[in-house]
């Protein structure tokens, strides 16, 4: 069912709140992976506030959908989502990165409630996701596995091993997202290590590839609906290639230097205003294009 | 024990160690629908043939991709299954080291790795296929239990124990046949507890894997030829190591030799030496193992070359027995 305007606006509001909470967490932490956190935040929002079949009061529920953040450094955005959702106390965000905290730069599934896989070392999520999806098949369960990788992360060959397994075993119950924000630590992906033609590569690996604007809630939902519809039958899985902006919503959006940032007080105040303006534009779009 | 099949001495002379693993895991899988076997194009080499007969749908082959194999196993464990991963030791420990560390050990994923072709048991394949660093790597991994069975019967015991115990295991077995050490399964195998293969009071040889049978042979020879009373401990569990048995050996025999088909760096010898040093008790100590990359050849020739066969152990025992290591408090006359 197509996303209603009302639902779109509600998701926009939630994404806006989470962008603010992510920025605030970066300030509490002293610094953080703000760029990659902001680029994937719209996906995190639609996952946790629309799609994932999970129970906050039973986080280990065995039939729950799984979500694997392969780009584990986006924890600066993921932790706020897990706290806002109710898995963990929001107060925990004030301890992010601090000595002795349960929440570090990369989340530990044995310490932070709601995390399905401990990630941080890149290129691990695809195989883990293939494993959970295979386990669902073997056990006759119908939960779905969602996984998001970064784009620079695709330099790790292990991703492609996992993709081969997903396609060989026709794991349509596994839905892959790629956060194509075009940036990595040392520069733009095409300058550091060329990825293009990425969509063709993914299709060549057997995926049903859908290219979307990954910072557009409506496109995210439409693509996810299409992938879920295909998941009912055993067939090749869907990969949703999300064109995103690193640091989406911030004045530094699109600049690879925003991969990891420290925010001083004046910048914090400025960024909060920028996020509000960004939200206003997105609401305007939802109002205009929503049905 | 998981199933009804019992392994004995005759089985071991007719069935290779890895084949006993294959039968043991097939036996478990018959009655345990959550157990799955995962391999990386080595179903045949790691002897999963019996599993393929029993439940082919639960044999997952990921192709030549050990990193993927470990990640998939972690994912399956996270979703409630009990994966037994089978691959060559060299690649399980080195190629997939990060996945072993992060996906399995860090997350305490209930994955059982049965690493075959360990040590120099695939000797003719050369150093790319020798696994003589794997104990150093796996021993350093938190949450991982590391077992080196000495023969086929012990492999069956280790596999059953791993299945019965929550948490990640690394079981390191050889390619081909092992010398028979245990004739029945009920000799008292317990994870983390050394087995006394030979009682002795003059010196203790602590061995694991294929070196245990060599140590036993050496002890029998030394008893007859030199009148020495050599204690032989089968230290099948490298982690958690049996501190009690080691300290008992320190106190009662004052001389220890470790022997393993692994580099002297980081393996059994290192594990035993850590216990001895930490205890503050002194004893004569010698570690036998590979000093560097091993030669190409048959395992028995490589073991002889490295001095980890019966002859090498005999020579080492005689050397250490010559050392003056008394129970008095005078350190000046110690070697």
Image (cartoon, grey):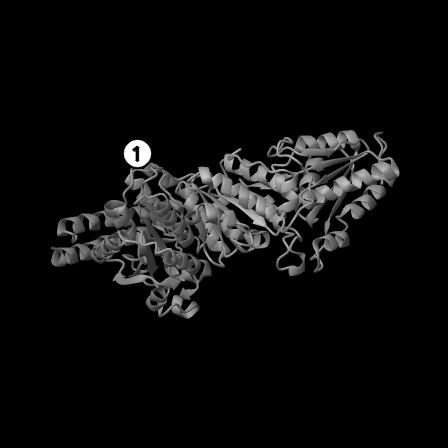
How many callouts does the rendering have? Answer: 1
B199 above or below A26?
above
> The residue marked by circle 1 belongs to what chain?
A
Quadrant position of residue A156:
bottom left
Percent of width and height locating residue B213: 72, 42
- The residue shown at (67%, 53%) is B120
In the shown orientation, is residue A61 left or right of residue B302?
A: left
The quadrant of the image that shows the C terminus of chain A is bottom left
In the shown orientation, is residue A181 left or right of residue B282?
A: left
Q: Disc 1 designates what residue?
A: A57
- Of helix, strand and loop, which one carries label 1? loop
Percent of width and height locating residue B149: 63, 41
Percent of width and height locating residue A75: 38, 48
Can see residue B199?
Answer: yes
Dot 1 surroundings within 10 Å: few (below 14), some, or many (20 or more)? few
Percent of width and height locating residue A274: 25, 55
Compare residues B290 and A139 and report the one nearer the observer: A139
- The residue shown at (26%, 62%) is A212
A60 above or below A285?
above
- The residue shown at (44%, 56%) is A123
Can see residue B279?
Answer: no
Quadrant position of residue A219:
bottom left
């Amino acid at each position: 069912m197509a996303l209603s305007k009302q639902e779109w606006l509600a998701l926009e509001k939630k994404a806006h709140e989470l962008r603010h909470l992510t920025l605030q967490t970066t300030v509490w932490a002293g610094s953080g992976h703000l760029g990659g956190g902001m680029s994937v935040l719209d996906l995190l929002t639609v996952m946790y506030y629309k799609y994932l079949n999970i129970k906050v009061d039973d986080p280990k529920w065995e039939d729950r959908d799984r979500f694997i953040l392969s780009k584990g450094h986006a924890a600066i955005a993921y932790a706020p989502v897990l706290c806002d959702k109710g898995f963990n106390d929001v107060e925990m965000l004030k301890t992010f990165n601090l000595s002795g905290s349960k929440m570090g730069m990369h989340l530990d599934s044995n310490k932070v409630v709601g995390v399905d896989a401990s990630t941080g070392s890149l290129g691990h999520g695809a195989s883990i996701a293939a494993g959970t999806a295979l386990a669902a098949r073997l056990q006759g369960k119908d939960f779905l596995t969602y996984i998001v990788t970064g784009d620079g992360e695709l330099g790790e060959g292990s991703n492609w091993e996992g993709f081969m397994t997903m396609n060989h075993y026709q794991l349509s119950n596994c839905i892959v997202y790629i956060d194509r924000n075009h940036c990595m630590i040392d520069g733009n992906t095409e300058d550091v290590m060329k990825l293009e033609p990425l969509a063709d590569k993914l299709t060549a690996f057997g995926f049903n590839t859908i290219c979307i604007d990954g910072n557009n809630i409506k496109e995210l939902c439409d693509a996810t609906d299409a992938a879920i519809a295909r998941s009912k039958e055993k067939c090749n899985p869907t990969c949703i290639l999300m064109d995103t902006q690193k640091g989406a919503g911030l004045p530094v959006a699109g600049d690879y230097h925003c991969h990891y940032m420290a925010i001083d007080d004046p910048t914090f105040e400025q960024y909060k205003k920028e996020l509000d303006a960004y939200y206003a534009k997105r609401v305007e779009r939802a109002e205009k294009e929503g049905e | 024990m998981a199933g009804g099949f019992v392994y004995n001495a005759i089985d071991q002379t007719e069935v290779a160690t890895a084949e006993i693993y294959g039968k043991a895991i097939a036996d478990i899988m018959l009655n345990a629908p959550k157990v799955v076997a995962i391999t990386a194009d080595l179903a045949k080499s790691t002897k999963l043939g019996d599993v393929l007969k029993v439940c082919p749908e639960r044999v997952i082959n990921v192709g030549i991709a050990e990193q993927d194999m470990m990640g998939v196993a972690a994912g399956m464990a996270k979703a409630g299954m009990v994966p037994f991963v089978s691959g060559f030791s060299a690649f399980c420990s080195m190629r997939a080291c990060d996945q072993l560390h992060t996906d399995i050990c860090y997350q305490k994923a209930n994955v059982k790795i049965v690493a075959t072709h360990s040590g120099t048991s695939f000797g003719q394949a050369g150093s790319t296929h020798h696994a003589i660093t794997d104990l150093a790597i796996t021993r350093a991994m938190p949450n991982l239990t590391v077992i080196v069975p000495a023969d086929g019967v012990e492999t069956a015991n280790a596999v059953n124990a791993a299945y019965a115990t929550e948490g990640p295991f690394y079981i390191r077995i050889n390619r081909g046949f092992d010398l028979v050490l245990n004739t029945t399964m009920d000799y008292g195998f317990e994870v983390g507890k050394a087995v006394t293969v030979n009682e002795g009071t003059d010196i203790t040889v602590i061995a694991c894997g294929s070196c245990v049978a060599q140590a036993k042979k050496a002890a029998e020879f030394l008893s007859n030829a030199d009148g020495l009373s050599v204690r032989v401990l089968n230290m099948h569990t490298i982690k958690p190591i049996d501190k009690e048995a080691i300290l008992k050996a320190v106190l009662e025999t004052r001389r220890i030799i470790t022997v393993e088909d692994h580099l002297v760096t980081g393996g059994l010898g290192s594990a035993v030496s850590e216990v001895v040093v930490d205890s503050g008790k002194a004893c004569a100590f010698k570690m036998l193992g590979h000093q560097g990359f091993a030669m190409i050849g048959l395992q028995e020739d490589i073991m002889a070359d490295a001095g980890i066969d019966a002859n090498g152990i005999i020579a080492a025992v005689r050397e250490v027995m010559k050392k003056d290591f008394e129970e008095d408090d005078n350190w000046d006359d110690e070697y």
